């Protein structure tokens, strides 16, 4: 701004003050010289009357231009080849064939990214822009520069021809900064208030696709960088029929990572930073749980056996040689009796068998006590634990009782746990699960729980615009008109925005132009296009466009839930009936239906998993399962 004294002298520094086009032209002149290392602006361009390189462009006859994708691709391939080989003469010829303005031609000669070329050209030709994409305030210009500076990998990285894809960044959180700040505050409280025996609990509610999981998962990176431990527990539609399996699997994933770390340490001939942390935690677990407790929990967390091989070798020896072991010493271990271990399912209040009811209650109480001890052993103010339980509306009642006991058990021991509990659930489905309603009510009524409630609605227009801007790798100014239409149709639901844009790419109402090296669209056509009643219809339509073999593979994978273990699929693939599962799922992963996480396939959303599951004819459900 100091380079433009007219603005400073007239007091027009405010970022929200509308400026005349000539001021933006002055900015454009400065940026042009900056990015071209002092090159003089082409003659008429300085007055905003930039002309085109080729006289043929003076004609408005669109049919005289080669606007086909084939023509785009051919010219862009020539440009790409010239740029890669550093042949500036060929690059110049390729630019001329692209029929661009002289200013943009000069900028592209410097191999500048497309957003930079567009920025400078639009500033110089400030009167050319429409009401939707013209610069109006200093804030518009500041935002565009800020986007490029903060996300150079998005806005300042050119893709090779043929590599363009609609890309939504998992690490980008649009329009949810206030909610993220509240989550961070709750985590900070958990670290401090644990000494006062308070439990910090955050409940995030919203409609399907509102971004509940995405919001919370964006906490993982900043927290783990600051010493936090992280456990992620995902319930799905099949969880209610499998008591405690989901929570046990979450703990197993956490302790499996410790096994890998322990194996790595044992295979090294030197110590590294972080080794002491592992052995301190293992010692704390052994001190808090003792041998019987570790043996019991190993039935739910098998990796404990690998972390404590000496304990389990000793247990086997003692079971073989001391059959008359005193009952009192192994009282906790005896709850593994098969008749009791089968009773972890929910207990009906009208249970006829009083003895079984009492035994099951004793078993659950002991198990809850051991998990409390486990959390105290692995968490402390130096390494607190962030425990995320996703889609609680599908949690089984045993898991909800365990969660409640962990939260409420904070004040029952001199050694407090340092845990931030975060749960998410669908606001429209919470009342279906009565156990969840009771669990939430107990948190609200407790004086020992510091409860933070976050409700997620659709994104504001600015959030939708930022999301589309990142996906298309174009500044927010250039996608405002598209964002307005998409926001109107989706009400800002993030999943709906993603799905609608992908659908637009499929029907080519949104397409990448090789000519201009950017995404192009027709907002009027998109606005008039009919929209299915709900997102499930769009997802189902997308799945039905895939090859039949891929649809069948996705349906089979959906029977396992949101996360599918590849080893299970490999076993299935050995049979003639289910051969070719993995290649077909790899194809689905390339299409963005599932994500390949190494040992697992993960559906990108539970609505996607449901859409795949619903492809199974009702009469074939039993046979397929």
Image (spheres, helix red, strand yellow):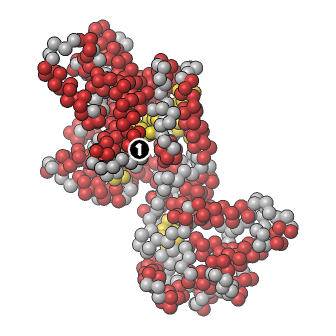
Q: Quadrant of residue 45?
A: bottom right
Residue located at (34% from left, 53% from top)? 596
Residue located at (41% from left, 44% from top)? 274
Residue located at (20% from left, 26% from top)? 314
Please identify the quadrant where the C terminus is shown.
top left
Q: Quadrant of residue 254?
A: top left
Answer whether residue 78 is visible to the viewer in this image.
no
**In the depicted structure, whether residue 270 falls above or below residue 85:** above
**In the depicted structure, whether residue 79 falls above or below residue 587:** below
Residue 15 in the image: x percent, y percent? 75, 60
Residue 89 in the image: x percent, y percent? 50, 91
Residue located at (52% from left, 71% from top)? 518
Report whether 107 appears left or right of 575.
right
- The residue most toward the right is 10
Report whether 371 appears left or right of 462.
left
Residue 423 in the image: x percent, y percent? 48, 34
* Label 1 sits on residue: 274
Observer-nearest of 271 and 262: 271
Answer whether residue 413 is visible to the viewer in this image.
yes
Give the SS element for disc 1: loop
Crowding at mark 1 (Cα within 10 Å: few <14, some 14-19, many 20+) = few
């Amino acid at each position: 701004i100091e380079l433009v004294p007219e603005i400073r002298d007239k007091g027009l520094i405010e970022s929200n003050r509308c400026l005349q086009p000539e001021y933006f032209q002055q900015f454009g002149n400065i940026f042009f010289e900056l990015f071209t290392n002092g090159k003089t602006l082409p003659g008429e361009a300085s007055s905003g009357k930039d002309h085109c390189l080729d006289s043929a462009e003076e004609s408005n006859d669109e049919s005289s231009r080669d606007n086909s994708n084939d023509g785009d691709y051919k010219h862009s391939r020539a440009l790409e080849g010239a740029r890669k080989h550093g042949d500036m003469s060929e690059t110049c010829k390729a630019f001329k064939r692209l029929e661009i303005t002289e200013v943009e031609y000069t900028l592209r000669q410097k191999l500048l990214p497309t957003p930079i070329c567009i920025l400078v050209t639009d500033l110089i030709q400030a009167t050319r822009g429409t009401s939707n994409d013209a610069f109006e305030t200093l804030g518009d210009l500041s935002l565009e520069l800020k986007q490029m500076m903060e996300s150079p990998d998005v806005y300042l990285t050119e893709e090779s021809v043929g590599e363009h894809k609609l890309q939504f960044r998992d690490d980008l959180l649009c329009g949810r900064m206030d909610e993220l700040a509240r989550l961070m505050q709750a985590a900070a409280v958990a670290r401090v208030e644990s000494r006062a025996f308070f439990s910090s609990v955050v409940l995030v509610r919203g409609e399907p696709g509102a971004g509940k999981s995405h919001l919370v998962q964006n906490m993982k990176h900043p927290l783990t960088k600051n010493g936090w431990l992280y456990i992620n527990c995902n319930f799905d539609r099949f969880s209610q029929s499998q008591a405690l399996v989901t929570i046990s699997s979450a703990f197993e994933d956490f302790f499996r990572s410790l096994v890998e770390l322990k194996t790595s340490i044992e295979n090294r001939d030197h110590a590294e930073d972080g080794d002491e942390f592992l052995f301190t935690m293992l010692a704390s677990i052994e001190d808090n749980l003792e041998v019987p407790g570790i043996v019991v929990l190993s039935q739910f967390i098998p990796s404990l056996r690998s972390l404590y091989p000496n304990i389990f070798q000793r247990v086997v020896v003692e079971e073989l040689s001391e059959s008359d072991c005193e009952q009192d010493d192994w009282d906790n271990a005896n709850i593994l009796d098969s008749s009791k271990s089968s009773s972890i399912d929910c207990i009906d209040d009208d249970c006829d068998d009083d003895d079984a009811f009492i035994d099951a209650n004793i078993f659950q109480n002991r198990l809850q006590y051991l998990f409390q001890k486990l959390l105290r052993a692995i968490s402390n103010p130096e390494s607190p634990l962030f425990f995320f339980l996703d889609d609680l509306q599908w949690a089984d009642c045993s898991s909800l009782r365990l969660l409640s006991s962990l939260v409420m058990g904070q004040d029952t021991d001199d050694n407090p746990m340092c845990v931030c509990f975060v749960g998410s659930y669908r606001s429209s489905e919470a009342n279906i699960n009565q156990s969840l309603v009771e669990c939430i009510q107990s948190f609200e009524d407790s004086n020992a729980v510091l409860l933070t409630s976050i409700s997620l609605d659709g994104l504001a227009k600015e959030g939708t615009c930022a999301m589309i801007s990142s996906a298309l790798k174009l500044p927010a100014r250039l996608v405002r008109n598209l964002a307005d239409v998409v926001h109107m149709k989706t009400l800002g639901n993030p999943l709906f925005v993603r799905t609608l844009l992908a659908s637009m790419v499929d029907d080519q109402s949104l397409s990448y132009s090789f000519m201009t090296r950017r995404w192009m669209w027709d907002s009027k056509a998109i606005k008039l296009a009919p929209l299915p009643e709900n997102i499930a219809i769009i997802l189902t339509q997308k799945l039905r466009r895939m090859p039949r073999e891929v649809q069948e593979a996705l349906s089979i994978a959906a029977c396992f839930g949101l996360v599918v273990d590849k080893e299970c699929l490999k076993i299935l693939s050995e049979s003639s009936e289910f051969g070719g599962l993995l290649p077909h799922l790899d194809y689905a992963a390339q299409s963005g239906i599932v994500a390949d996480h190494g040992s697992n396939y993960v559906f990108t959303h539970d609505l996607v998993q449901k859409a795949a599951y619903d492809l199974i004819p009702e009469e074939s459900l039993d046979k397929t399962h």
